[in-house]
Amino acid sequence: MPPGRDSHPFFVLLRWLPAIHPGGSGLETAVRWEHFPHDADVGVRGFGRTKEEAFEQVAVALTAVITDPDRVGPEQSVEVACEAPDDEMLLVDWLNALVYEMAVRRLLFSEFEVRIEGSRLSGTARGEPVDVARHRPAVEIKGATVTELAVGREADDLWRAQCVVDV
């Protein structure tokens, strides 16, 4: 473990948060997100009954790296569009588009709607301006990476979308 990692606020937060979080539908075994450890960075993973739900849930996991998504209201909508040659790169492009929108607009997102047609994704992210006192951001995400990048169906027929984000 790198020096100082135990005391870094993000890693303290990771130990505090439960490992698996149900999605908004209440289907704890289907739609959910989670984090997984990776050296000095963090893995984000989403599960859903469809590829779109998995992409929506991994976006919630992305927000949860920064703050508790339940503290973020859906006050503003931002449209995001991306295109990539395969599902894995589409996931990286989706997450990096969200990181960009959060940084440029100084917003945090808590709700997502994704539509995928072939190699194109169009999505809506809903959130609100960062309020440092209320949101208590733990880290700033630099971007999604191809490390541990995977999109596909699991044995239980759920879709899984995951990668490591650089913090």
Image (tube, grey):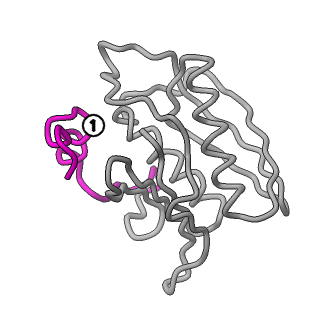
In-front residue for pair 58/164? 164
- The question of residue 4 being in magenta is answered with yes
Amino acid type, residue under disc 1 in the picture: Phe
Residue at point 61%, 21% (across, down): 76
The span shown in magenta is 1-25
Residue drawn 38% across the image and 40% down it: 65
Percent of width and height locating residue 132: 35, 14
Which image quadrant for residue 95? top right
Q: Position of residue 85 (x, y in %)?
A: 82, 61
Which residue extends farthest bottom? 155
Tell me the quarter of the picture where residue 122 sits. Answer: top right
Look at the picture and state if 5 lies above or below 44.
above
Left or right of 163 on screen, residue 133: left
Q: Is residue 79 magenta?
A: no
Question: Where does residue 90 sit, x and y in percent of width and height?
Answer: 71, 55
Instruction: Determine which residue is flagged by label 1.
Output: 10
Image position of 140 with respect to 114: above or below: above
Q: Percent from the top left, x then y, of residue 22?
A: 38, 56
89 with respect to 48 (left or right): right
Q: Quadrant of the C terminus?
A: top left
